[in-house]
Image (cartoon, rainbow, N blue to C red):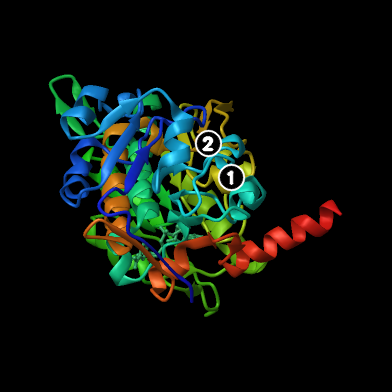
Amino acid sequence: MPVLSVDRGGHLLLGILKETVPGETRVALLPESLKSLRSQGIAVTVEAGAGLASGASDTAYIEAGASVTANRDSILANADILPMVNAPAAADQAWLKPGAVVIGFLKPLDAPAALAAAITRPVTLFSMELVPRISRAQSMDALSSMATVAGYKAVIAAADRLPRLFPMLMTAAGTVPQARVFVIGAGVAGLQAIATARRLGAVVEAYDVRAAAGEQVRSLGAKFLDVDLGGISTEGGGGYAAELTEEALDRGRDLITRTAAHSDVIVTTAQVPGRPAPRLIRRAAVEAMRPGSVLVDLAAPAGGNCELTKPGVTQTIGGVTLLAPLNLATEVPVHASQLYARNILNFLALIVKKGVLTVNLDDEVLAGACVAHEGNPVNPRVAKLLEVAQSAAN
Ligand code: NAD
């Protein structure tokens, strides 16, 4: 495996760019993140306004030892390390300095063609989505960080829309019953949604195909709904769910329709890595909900769990509000950036030691996260997708 080592005698430059994707509010590193980098002699340059939406002013970056410039292209052309939230735009990719390392949510499997320009350049691209989910890399697991924020925010968004209260209230004017929340998919986002709904005082039920999720659901004070799937294997490896047959999915759909009828809020998060989100919520389930109820489809970026979902669009269907947010983490930019920055810093610790940049693709975390290195795709799935796109274009 190739090893790239860059020792610029303590003159490594790290650039923090202002994100350009519409609606993006996060920033890759905050002023508080710079201490360990500066102590290694790494210079940091920040694009003016990069952290504003996350509560980090240009002055705060300067006070943390960075320089600030409005010249984005000079950062792109000079930085040895570019931690980002989203993938650089094609115009940015053309500026990248040879030998530069770019790290971010690069969407290499969803949109590999958008990285085509950078993949052919003599740079290294690491994707936070591809960081292997092994114990050693837990502190770099940015997908879990963002799922945690999204799970929390989904419940807050639902509570805000719901024309009812969450907790049971016993007042002189009578008793208000608890809201009933149904969480589908008890992974990272789902478990955080359960915990948040419980903290707000709701009664919570949850469903997941992985039996292992049952114990975690119950430990949060929620009821786990079991479905007899006829003994089929539901684990796809790495703790993830397997893609189910239509027959097995139907058993889940029936349970969901029954449970929807008495739920005030549904937060649905079910996903199978690399596949479209399973369509678990039928129109009949939405129609079974009381007017005023709220459904938050966190699987919207992968197409959605509900057959009525339009990703990114809020709809009202028979009095039920259906939210299909594409990136709820952007609505909590301070803490989303804080968690992301810590994930990035932990990742950087694998490639920068004592101010020297070394990309050693023998490291399984680096190899797993590497999209491309020195002009060639490294991740075999990305390479295959690019090949397919190329042959379709010819
Ligand atoms: P995810 O986003 O891929 O899926 C969310 C949930 O949907 C999962 O719990 C999955 O079982 C569920 N699901 C899929 N198909 C379903 C269906 N048809 N019906 C009902 N539910 C369905 O998963 P995630 O939240 O990223 O993580 C899932 C698992 O991975 C968890 O067990 C988690 O503990 C584990 N994990 C491990 C690490 C690590 O070791 N570093 C990090 C993160 C997550």
Instruction: Look at the numbered disc 1 and give the secondary structure of its residue.
Output: loop
As rendered, which of 123 and 236 lies closer to the eye?
A: 123
User: Residue 200 location, x and y as percent?
Assistant: 23, 37
- Residue 261 marker: none
As rendered, which of 384 and 249 lies closer to the eye?
A: 384
Quick one: label 2 or label 1, which is nearer the N terminus? 1
Picture quarter containing residue 14? top left
State the residue position of label 1. Answer: 306
- Neighbor class of circle 2 (other Cα within 10 Å; few <14, some 14-19, many 20+) is many
Left or right of 150? Residue 346 is left
> Is residue 210 at least partly visible in the picture?
no
Mark 1: amino acid: Cys
As rendered, which of 352 and 99 lies closer to the eye?
A: 99
State the residue position of label 2. Answer: 324
Left or right of 62? Residue 110 is right
Left or right of 355? Residue 121 is right
Whole-angstrom CA distance, mark 2 to mark 1, is 9 Å
Where ligand 1 lies, by quadrant? bottom left
**Which residue extends farthest top?**
173
* Whether label 2 touches label 1, CB < 8 Å: yes
User: Residue 375 location, x and y as percent?
Assistant: 60, 59
User: Residue 285 location, x and y as percent?
Assistant: 57, 44
Q: Image point 33% across, 44% down: which residue?
A: 13
- Neighbor class of circle 1 (other Cα within 10 Å; few <14, some 14-19, many 20+) is many
Q: Image point 27% across, 30% down: which residue?
A: 67
As rendered, which of 22 and 38 lies closer to the eye?
A: 38
**Which residue extends farthest left?**
172
